[in-house]
Amino acid sequence: MSKSRENKGKAVWADDMNDVKESEYFDSELEAILQHYRVELPEEQRINTTIDVLRQYVPDISENPREVTMMRYWRRWINLWKISAADIGMFSKLYWMSCLVLFGVGVWIGVTVQQMPAIVVILFSPLPFVIGLLEVFKGREQGVLEMELACKVSAQELMLSRLLFIVMNSLILNTCLSGLLYLVRGDISFWGLTWTWFTPFIIVASSSLWLAIRIRCTVSSMVTISMWMAVGMILLTRPDMLTRMMHLHILITILINAGAVYLLIRQGWKLLRNHTFIAEGSLSYGANDSEYF
Amino acid sequence: MELTIQNISKQFKELVAVNQFTAELSCGVYGLLGPNGAGKTTLLRMLADILRPTSGMIQLNGQDIRSMGERYRDVLGYLPQQFGYYRQFTGRRFLMYIAALKGLEKRAAATKVEEVLQLVGLGYEADSKIKSYSGGMGQRLGIAQALLNDPKVLILDEPTAGLDPTERIRFRNILSEMSANRIILLSTHIVSDIEYVAKDVLLMKQGCLLKQDRLVSLLKELKESVWKVTVDESQLPILKQRYKIVNILRRDSGVEVRILSPDKPLLTAQPVTAGLEDLYLHYFNEEIMQ
Amino acid sequence: MLSDEELITEIRSGSQAAMEMLVKRHYAMIYSYIYRKIGNHHTAYDLTQEVFIKMMQSLSSYQSHGKFEHWLLKIAVNHCLDYYRSKQYRNAHIQDELDETIPDASSNVWDLFQLHDQQEQAKQAVLALPEHQRDAIILNYYHGLKIREIADVTGANESTIKSRIRAGISRLKKMLLGEEESSDEQEQRKQG
């Protein structure tokens, strides 16, 4: 600050010291000596040390729960979408290909097979999601999780953002499939079709997520897909069961849907909060650590 | 920078992996030594805030790292003992991915990634797919990712596993350069990793901290206890039975045996300066693995 | 560039980065004030750290009346006062406790003109000033603060500040320039 000497010497005094004699000023001779009292600042390292000590005095946002909670959730939500957008490029080709293939097959069967277009949509609706789960948990699977966990953007936020994307993507794909079938075939209603696939989708989605959190994802995905195929087989061979299911009382359907959505959200939340759980669970599988067993 | 570990314990069901571990670390390199199953990895995971301790607290500059949350991860660099990669990625892409996770902005990330690649010597292979990397290259990539956010606390779990001697020396030099205003803790079996760079050595056994001291001081304890003697092949079994053998070298003149013993084992034995391998055997009753 | 007040708002919402910026922005000012006041690097470093800690602790009650820099300087001035009054300091400096009585310029600082190192000259001269005069001189000369501002920072009234500065300058002149005159006179006398 000794650099800013614009207002040194007489200029300052002129304002403030009208009654001061000339000899009482900082004259140039005195100044010439005084300016030699220079200051050598400490090294940047030492200044950084001081800054480090000061870090604990920076208030922690969580100390003000009421004020900031709403903002925090909103910010977190936006943040998740941001991460999602950035992360899309990281999704493996396998996922995108599977989506395309499934879509293509779905359209083809839906268009060519005469009866029961609904069944096509029902069978295919959860599949993109289940395959997507592989993407969500790939960090855990491929052993990158431990590295990701030590990063600022926590791995669980990452997983959650991928999950959000998968859900969105599945919903879009299924809606497009329904839309296409509706346009091509004249005999079905769009909303009816949508409603039809939504229920199995949400049920399978929430239960497969539940399963994937608890056991190894590749395993759980396979289990889910095989079980779903089995269900599909049963329904195909027993169309009367299908008709009965489809005409369940609307209230029951709503209840089932709501329950499944709730489960999905809860699992998502768990993914976000309980990171040690994920870490411990997957670390037991991911790393062959003789220290555990 | 001060990392204070206060009475940390970790229990998995009936197994106590870490038992009331207490230590204080400041800037410099620290070596964590111990046999397999000593709890080193568990301890390091807790220091990286990946695992929650069952009891005790870890503080950075007086603040609980748990409550610091992402602020701690902001200054943390961690290399796990075992890890994988997204094998379809190139080395550079993987580092950019991790850089994004560490909160680096795209432009800053690109510069930092290049810097770090050069540092670990992966400049040429950066744009090849990771699945084509050798073990050593993969390990170096792991070290690289830990350095991306210029961490003030660097936790490395067996960082030199799979590196050849030249790479290990290079790694040691990198650490040495960086240690001025960072806390670096690495667990290792390899003598040369810490012999010349470590400030203190922490000896860990069965989840407990045996000792924390400067290497020089620890070695002083063994001053009159390490001997070298050349014997005949036939005498070897007896020696093995009676004394702790640090290592055996077969030479033309016979078998040169390095023995750990408080008293002179044989008349012809010569005292030698104690080294880390002797220390290891002394405390852990097993040979250090090279 | 963010203003000090904007940085403070950020810090209050938990931004570490803003704290870093604020500290780095004003570190030199505080450190140089304290160093010139105390004359010792180690002590100045520690006291500077303490001043910033005090700053962080009072940030929640900071209201933007006037410049932030002056508020911060006020903390520094008071902290140095506390330091001088502290037991710690007294114990370490029993011999040379500063008092307001005017020491004999020629006897106390007789070796000043012998110091060829101009840095040392200036330093010892300033350090030889009584505490309040030193404050006023440092703030006015080295930091460019006006009388009104110094009064605000030190909590004294303007006329007191004026007289302190006057006295300080007078003493400095005696120590640094007055002695030269007498040695000149001596030279002249020698040459007859």
Image (spheres, coloured by chain):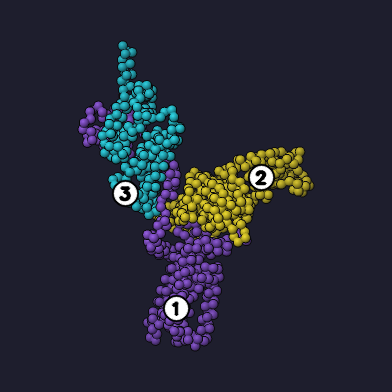
Chain colours: A purple, B yellow, C cyan
Determine the chain carrying the residue at label 2: B
* B265 horizontally vs C98: left or right: right
Same chain under badges 2 and 1? The reply is no
x 59%, y 45%: residue: B212
Residue B253 seen in the figure: no
Q: Position of residue B200 (x, y in %)?
A: 57, 44
Residue type pointed to by label 3: Gln
Residue type pointed to by label 2: Asp
Mark 1 crowdedness (10 Å alpha carbons): few <14, some 14-19, many ≥20: few
Kindly identify which residue carries mark 2. B278
Determine the chain carrying the residue at label 1: A
| Alpha carbon separation for disc pair 1 and 3 | 55 Å
In this view, C143 is above or below C99: below
Question: Which quadrant of the figure has residue C140?
Answer: top left
Q: Nearer the viewer, mark 2 or mark 1?
A: 1
x 31%, y 29%: residue: C168
In this view, C135 is above or below A240: above
Mark 3 crowdedness (10 Å alpha carbons): few <14, some 14-19, many ≥20: few
Element at label 1: helix
Kindly identify which residue carries mark 3. C63
Quadrant of the drawing holding the N terminus of chain A: top left
Mark 2 crowdedness (10 Å alpha carbons): few <14, some 14-19, many ≥20: many
Q: Nearer the viewer, mark 3 or mark 2?
A: 3
* B280 horizontally vs C27: left or right: right
Residue C78 seen in the figure: yes
Q: Which mark is residue A255?
A: 1
| Alpha carbon separation for disc pair 2 and 1 | 70 Å
